[in-house]
Each structure stands twice: as C-alpha cells, then as structure tokens.
Image (tube, rainbow, N blue to C red):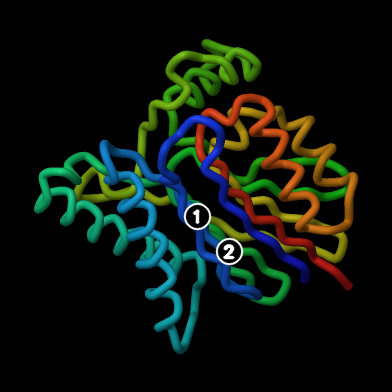
Amino acid sequence: MLAFAQSDIGMVRKTNEDSYVFLPPHLFVVADGMGGHVAGEIASSLGAETIRSYIEKITSPSNWDQILTEAIIQANTKIYQMSQSKSDCQGMGTTVTAIYLDHSQIHWSHVGDSRLYYIKNNELQQITSDHSLVWELMKNGSITSEEAQVHPHRNILTRAVGTSETISVDSGSFMWEPGDNLLLCTDGLTNMLSEETILSICIESSAPQTIINTLINQAKQAGGYDNITAILLQHRN
C-alpha cells in the first residue's frame, strides 16, 4: 500500500480547522471543525486525537466497524463536555470520517459531510452519505447534484460530532483489491472540485503525493474558500 496525506489552509481562512490522523497501514481519519474563534480547530483536533488514542489502546479487536463507532462516540462526549464547560467553545463540533484497514477489509465510520471515496476501474464511488441539508434535499429530489454544488446552504450540517450529548454514527465495511484507491477528504475539496475533476486527477498519476498536491492546488485555484484536507491510499500488489 502507498499512502499520502496533506492539509492546507486554503486561500481565504485565517486558521486551519481541519485535522487528520495518518497512521499507516491501518488508521486514517479526516475531521473538519466548526465553531467561532478557535473552537473549530479545537473540536477537530480533539476528535482526531481521541479516535487515535482509542484505537491504539485496542489489544484484541473483534469488530472494527463497532470499534471505530465507539471511538467517535467517545470523541463526541469529550467535545460536547468541553463545549459545555468553556464559553468560547460553546456550540463547537466537527465532522469525522475514519477508516481502519484490516488486511484487504476496509472498515469505516462517519459523521458529517467529509467523505470517503472508493476508486475502482476508473470509477469514483462515494461510500459515505453527507449529513447535510443539501444532501437531504438531493435525496428527496428537491434539488439536483449540480444545484447542491452551489446551494447557499450547502454548509449546513444535520449531524456533527460534539454538538449534542448523543450521536448517531454511520459505519460499514467492504473489500478492496490491488489497483483500487481510497480518498478521504473534507468539503474544502469537494465544494471546489467536481467529482469528474477529482476522478481525472486521481487516475492521471500513479504517485499519491502528486495526486494529493494536484487536488489541493486545483481546489485553491478554484477559490480555496475553505481548508482542504485529503488522504489517498493505493492498494498495490
């Protein structure tokens, strides 16, 4: 397996509220924080660190889907408690998209609108569902995917880690094979680049670092209105 991760502040924001965990060959997480002042940055880093710490303490795993979900639930508790105890952290939260590689099995858990993509046979499949207002509108047919890309409320989340005492976590697993790629990213990438553009960049080079650098640079050239974080994993023979 080859892997590369990068986070960029973008062209507009004064701080980077994204965080990530990059622990090859098993654990990879992206988190996009929200909240006033430095609260978003605190939420995403606390979420990422809590998940990393929780996973590293596991000695006899039985179900990685469940373990990842438990890690996110613990992150939710920690972020929520901090938001309740510190006035400048009130209302903070973060997205979390996490995967754990167990040989050829991909286990994932997810909350928010960061994404996990699966690239196979030059096709891009979004594994996670966005917990956002525009995703709900798209699902019920009120707007098209093209309209969702430019919708004025596309940043409104319906679910985030740390914003309430309890959290519902999506999870699942699937197999990947040699030649397949995985892309985890925050919406700083997907709000700037179409899926067609993302796919074309991912298949035009064999080097993960080159692909990630190109994705981030093109997102910045398109406006770079948000922080951009992306992790690419390539299954090699």
Q: Name above or below for residue 52 compared with residue 35.
A: below
Left or right: 73, with 151 as reference point: left
What residue is drawn where x is 41% and y is 46%?
A: 17
Residue 118: x, y in percent? 72, 49
Question: Residue 41 or 200: which is nearer the viewer?
Answer: 41
Residue 218: x, y in percent? 72, 34
Q: On the image, which quarter does residue 141 sit in? A: top right
Residue 111 visible at all: no
Q: On the image, which quarter does residue 204 sit in? A: top right
Residue 233 visible at all: yes
Total marks in image: 2
User: Dots 2 and 1: beta carbons under 8 Å?
Assistant: yes
Q: Name above or below for residue 228 compared with residue 132.
A: below
Q: On the image, which quarter does residue 128 sit in? A: top right
Q: Secondary structure at mark 1?
A: strand
The amino acid sitting under disc 2 is His
For disc 2, the neighbor class at 10 Å (few under 14, some 14 to 19, many from 20) is many
User: From the image, which quarter does the C terminus lie in?
Assistant: bottom right
Residue hosting label 1: 171
Residue 186: x, y in percent? 54, 43
Question: In the displayed image of the protein, which residue is found farthest to the bottom?
Answer: 59
Residue hosting label 2: 107
Q: Name above or below for residue 230 compared with residue 148.
A: below
What residue is drawn where x is 65% and y is 16%?
A: 146
User: From the image, which quarter does the N terminus lie in?
Assistant: bottom right
Left or right: 72, with 210 as reference point: left
